[in-house]
Amino acid sequence: MQIASFIDNEIYQSSESFTALNPYTLEPQHEVKSCDLMGLVMAIQAANRAFAQWRTSSYDERIQVVEKIYESLKQNADRYALLEAQDQGLPLHFVQKYGIQKSLQTIESTLNIFKSSAASITDANTELPQYAPVGVIAIVAPWNLSLRVTLDRLIPALLAGNAVVVKVSSHSVVTAAILGEILQNAGIVKGLVNVLVSQDKEVKKALLAHPGVRAISVAGNIQTAQSVLASSATFLSQQFKKVQISSGSKNSAVVLAEPTDQIFTEVMESFMLGQGQLVWNSSRLFILEKFESDWEERIRNYLAALRPSESVEDTSVWTPCLKRDSFEKFDEIKQQAHVDKAKLLLTEFMLSEQQKKVFLPPVFTKDMSRCSTLQQDQIHSPFYILSAVKYPFDVAKYSNVSYFGFAAHLWGEPEKLKKVAEALDVGLVTYNRSSFDVVGPVAGVKQSGFGQQDFQSFGDFFSNVKKLSF
């Protein structure tokens, strides 16, 4: 499949290109035209021209455009899910449920909130704040469930009256093709949304620094966040911009009950679907000491039966790892676990030499030192920590040592988990489900979120808010 950027409602054919690989076979899958600096400038210019028109559009006009985006996504849901699953090495059923369907639910929810808010603002209450669009907003998307994360931000940006330039990940290039098709089907205003795909690091730097961009929304790992913050020191000294960063996680799964079949399956999926690479993944499992032997036996049996997935249609949750640095660091992580006196619970399946280039063998540890850096850092690979505590109130004490605060996944009776939830230093707590299932973006705390963590159309990131005083 040939993929290129979508600029000013046309396919942009740059001179540079790269090959995107199939995550299962490492064979060529897409030929990608890598957007250059000229294409970036054209995209920002197109967005600013469109903004001059779109900023004065009525609320009804904005709603109609977003509804067309929704219909285009809904009509092609299965095909888009297959394309993203093949690019990201994720199970098809997973992308259908947590990628495409959650995107549709998020659009529905965002539209309903916008309609309700717009109605109250239009009621001519002179004491209410006034909301004006910001301008051109840059969205930098991650590779995992890329379409979902992009739409989480694109939809409120458009409803607020902004124009947008999206930079998709070079690890999920097909998202650029999907977005371009959706926008064309929706008859989007010329230049209102531009979608860039590029391997040139200078393109992303220039996008964030360009004076024609008024706000930046970035979702990615901590390294991405750090690079954005490092470069922002230069461009923010010349021109202030709104900045919104969603970055990294070290999510805890907490189960204060014995492991029934249903609980065990749900908990393992929160770890394994995505192989520890996704912001929604659990990475540490907190259980009570009195149930430790039951959990350990189940985990050992689970790992023994695990087999690597052969394709996106496979139901196995042992899927490819996309980032090469995960492979490079995996042995170091296991060595650190030995230094920290942890015991390793290992998979039994022997990977072939070819499979070793694609898959990392999932590992659970037990008896890990509470002071280990592995308890604090995001690892981006299928390396998980089993921690037994004597009392429920110990969970927060050990979970909160992480630098990250995205989510915690709790299983059990909500009333018994209430005090644990209150003590956890995270932006989201889910009961008897994982954060995959939550509609809309999450405002993380600590190193999981930076800047203006407001994702509403009538909020202080996607809108400029003017206070009126009489």
Image (spheres, rainbow, N blue to C red):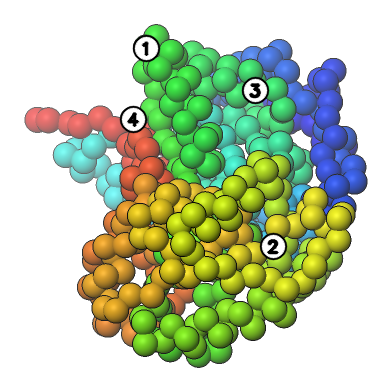
CA gap, disc 3 to disc 2?
31 Å
Can you tell which of label 3 and label 2 is closer to the viewer? Answer: 2
Q: Mark 4 = which residue?
A: 464
- Against 356, residue 299 (above or below) is below
Where disc 3 sits, the SS reads helix
Provide residue 90's location: percent of width, then percent of height. 71, 59
Provide residue 378's location: percent of width, then percent of height. 49, 49
Quarter of the image where the N terminus is located: top right
Q: Quadrant of residue 194?
A: top right
Q: Mark 3 = which residue?
A: 201
Residue 204 placement, left or right of 253: right
Can you tell which of label 1 and label 2 is closer to the viewer? Answer: 2
Q: Quadrant of residue 154?
A: top right
CA gap, disc 1 to disc 2?
46 Å
Tell which circle, 3 or 2, labels the residue nearer the N-terminal end. 3
Q: Mark 2 = which residue?
A: 361
Residue 460 in view here: yes
Query: What's the residue at 59%, 71% (across, down)?
Result: 345
Where disc 4 sits, the SS reads strand
CA gap, disc 1 to disc 3?
21 Å
- Against 281, residue 326 (above or below) is above
Residue 63 in view here: no
Tell which circle, 4 or 1, labels the residue nearer the N-terminal end. 1
Residue type at mark 3 is Lys
Provide residue 390's location: percent of width, then percent of height. 29, 79
Q: 320 or 444, which is in the foreground?
A: 320
Query: What's the residue at 43%, 69% (across, down)?
Result: 367
Numbered badge on residue 237: 1
Residue type at mark 1 is Ser
Q: 411 or 36, which is in the foreground?
A: 411
Residue type at mark 2 is Pro
